[in-house]
Structures are given as structure tokens and as C-alpha cells.
Image: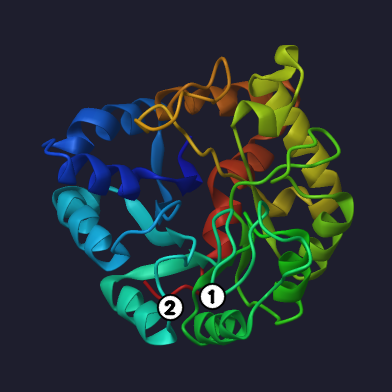
Amino acid sequence: MKIYDTHSDILFNLYKRTIEGEQNVFERYHKKALQAGNVVGGIWVVYSDSDFDVQYAYDVALSCFFPYQDQYDVLYGLEGLRNIHTIEELDQLYQKGVRHASLTWNEANDFATGVKADATRGLQPLGKKAIQYMNEHHMVIDVSHLNVKSFYEVLEENPKILLASHSNAYTLSDHIRNLTDDQLLKLRQSNGYVGVNSARNFVSKSSNKQNIDGLIDQMIYLGNRVGIDHVMLGLDMMDFLSDYDNANLDDLRSHADAYKIGQQLQNRGFTQREIEMICSKNYLRAIRDVKK
């Protein structure tokens, strides 16, 4: 069973470890795990939780990944526009191959407002221009990390390829980054997709549900609200991130464990067709208009 992960920080990891002096980062931290878990691609990002030269970061990350790029079906992404300030800079990233972006990480920036910033501040004028640019260039517009006001205001701009790449249902786990039932309804009405996040507190606040079974509970809940044909896997693995403790599920600690998801979906009564939809086909349909 092929798996596409709609949110992975692999590119950031390649950049960060390389500039710190490590070599063969992809080989050491990612290749074996991806192969073991049957993860063949997805959206790999550089995320911006602080100030740095994101153009340079992409140059470093893509140089590291270049020897392996033909072995994986990867859409290059940018998690947060904190470190760019103009549409021209966004275009520079597009020219490097970036085909996905979320407007924020958790902060407020020139484009929009993240979940940990002012709740009364929303989408900014430059953010509207960015959405227009992304629509015109067939880029994926990602609403994970936006605060509620920005989320609704982004949807008002009619994003063409819409994804919450790594967010779960707030009703099952009241994490600040999860989506309310009304947000899920609006996402579905906008033909959007959601990638189920395997970070433990996103799945459940109960320790006995911080496992693949709890993740499937999230898939079922999300499927009932956005349609199972709009649910994907946005795993957000953290085992390779030196700045974070591994906060993923007890039985889904890295990409190497991803194959277990298909097995457990089958155990829970999902059909082979439904399993393939969640693991790969929904994602491939969602990005069919992205010009790589």
C-alpha cells in the first residue's frame, strides 16, 4: 500500500542539519524509514518558526535531496510565509519548485494571522494577493495553522486547491490547531481536503487513544463531515527533529510505522478502496491540477 504524507518537515530537517555540519542527512534520517513505511511522497516543507533566509534554506534542502528526487513523488512546500515579505519573493520560491504554502505558522505576519496570535486579526491585504498568485499558479493553499478569523477569510478568497494539511477535529481533541465542526463544514463546501495529524495531542488528550486506533477515530469523524474522499494522512512526524521531543503516537513513532495505518484501517472494517483513498488517491486527486 503506497502512502502519501501531506505534511512532513523533511526539507527543513535537511537544511537545518546540513548547515550544522552533518552530512548525508537524507540517507541517515529518512530513506530507510520511508521505505519501511511504504511512504512514497507527499508534501515536504521548510517551516518558519523563526527568522532565517528561507530562499537559502530551500537551496540547501533541494541540493541535499537532489540525488534522491527521482525516487519519491514530492511536492515542495512552505509552512508559513514569515520569512518572505513580497509576492516577488513568493515567485522566487515558485521558480525553485515550491508548489504549496500555508500563509502562517503560529505567528502573525505580513500575510495573515496564526493560531497563537491576535484572534481579532485576520487575513492581510498581502495575503489576498498571495492567494491570487497561488490560484493563478495552481499552488496548494494550506489553511493549517491559521487562526479562525484568517481561516474563514481565506475561504472567502475562493482558493482553488485547498488543504488543511495536518489538522484534526477539535470535537475529539480540543487542541488549538484542530478544526471545529463549522470549519470542517466550510472546508467541505469549498471542496477542501484535510490531512489527519498523528501528533498525540492532536489525536486525543486521553493517553489510551494516543495510538493508531485513536487516529482512525479522527478519520471516521472527519470523514463524516468532509467525506471520506476528502481525508488524507498529514502525519507530521517529529522523530527526526532535534528541537522537538517525539510527540507522535505510541505505535506510530516515525515514517517506518506508517504501513501499520493500512493494516489497522482494514481491522476497523474499511474497504480496500477506502484505504487506498485515504493513503494515496485522495491526495493525488487533490493535486492533479498542480503544475510540477
How far across and how far down the image is residue 215, in percent? Answer: 68, 29
* N-term-proximal mark, 2 vs 1: 2
Judge from the rendering whether residue 73 lies leftward or rightward of residue 6; answer left or right. Answer: left
Q: Quadrant of residue 117?
A: bottom right
**Whether label 2 touches label 1, CB < 8 Å:** yes
Q: Residue at x 80, y 41 (%)?
A: 170
How far across and how far down the image is residue 267, in percent? Answer: 69, 19
What mark, if any, has residue 201 been given in the picture? none
Residue 270, compared with residue 11, is above or below; it is: above
Q: Give the spatial CA distance, label 2 vs label 1.
A: 6 Å
Evaluate whether residue 191 shows in this view: no
Residue 9, compared with residue 83, is above or below; it is: above
How far across and how far down the image is residue 145, in percent? Answer: 62, 54
Q: Which element carries disc 2, helix, strand or loop? A: loop
Q: Quadrant of residue 112?
A: bottom right
Q: Nearer the viewer, residue 245 or 212?
A: 245
How far across and how far down the image is residue 250, in percent? Answer: 57, 15
Residue found at the very far front of the displayed protein: 118
| Number of residues whose C-alpha sits closer than 10 Å to that of mark 1, classed few (under 14), some (14–19) or many (20 or more) | some
The residue tagged 2 is 85
Judge from the rendering whether residue 200 lies leftward or rightward of residue 4; answer left or right. Answer: right
| Number of residues whose C-alpha sits closer than 10 Å to that of mark 2, classed few (under 14), some (14–19) or many (20 or more) | few
Q: Which element carries disc 1, helix, strand or loop? A: loop
Three-letter amino acid code at the position of disc 2:
His
Q: Nearer the viewer, residue 20 or 130?
A: 20
What mark, if any, has residue 110 been given in the picture? 1
Q: Nearer the viewer, residue 50 or 210?
A: 50
Q: Residue at x 56, y 41 (%)?
A: 279
